[in-house]
Amino acid sequence: MNRAIIVSAQSELIFTIEQAARIEGFSSVAVISGGSEARRLIKGEPEPDLIIINAPLPDEFGQELAETAAEETAAGIILISPSDIAEELADRLSDYGVTVIARPFTHEELSRSIRLIAASRTRMSGLKEAPEIMGRIEEIRTISRAKTVLMKYLKFTEPQAHRYIEKQAMNNRQTRREVAEHIIQQYEK
């Protein structure tokens, strides 16, 4: 995780936000002042890992930008807003996974939010492997169920059922899972 985009028209906060992002491990930090420019950069490659929007922006408030960024990227998003509307914005943006921080904020609050987003993204990137793992687990379950069917209906032992599935897969040029699914369909109608 190393690419951050800061969208802010208030120059006095840019240094604080940029410093917090760099301390938390973001080596590439782009600073932009408007929503339209941010949209172009967000859609570019490589995709940002973190987007911090300091609302309001000169060309829009920033909520719409946060929503768009959440829909089009996997970046962690922080919206910094005036304190009088922060709670309302947090309610609206919670479904998008956007973190809202009320202004004024402390350096610790911002750093903690950035760290939390970084940890969440790290965890989520590990879950990208989950579909492959779940597919493999499902394959093993299907093959085990087919072995059970063979042991029940054809009185095979477990090693015999295993060999039968392996041999059918080789002879028919199918995967073991395809053979197992066929066996289950054939005997358990």
Image (tube, rainbow, N blue to C red):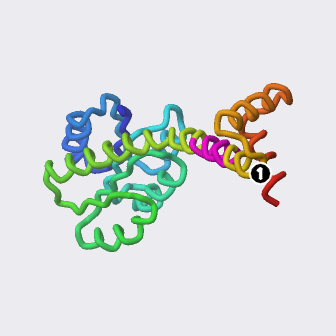
The quadrant the N terminus occupies is: top left
Residue ID at (20%, 49%) = 112
The x, y position of residue 182, in whole percent, is 81, 46
Front residue of 133 and 100: 133
The x, y position of residue 71, in whole percent, is 53, 54
Quarter-wise, where is residue 97 in the image?
bottom left
Please count the marks in the image: 1
Say what secondary structure mark 1 lies in: helix
Q: Which residue lies furthest to the top in this view?
A: 170
Task: Tell me if I can see residue 32 in this picture.
Answer: no
Residue ID at (57%, 39%) = 132
Q: Which amino acid does label 1 sit on?
A: Tyr
Q: Is residue 115 above or below residue 23?
A: below
Which residues lie in the magenta part?
A: 137-146
Residue ID at (53%, 32%) = 45
Q: Where is mark 1, residue-wise? A: 153
Front residue of 30 and 156: 156
- Report whether 36 appears left or right of 93: right
Residue ID at (61%, 46%) = 141
The quadrant the C terminus occupies is: bottom right
Q: Does the magenta stretch include residue 45?
A: no
The x, y position of residue 138, in whole percent, is 61, 46
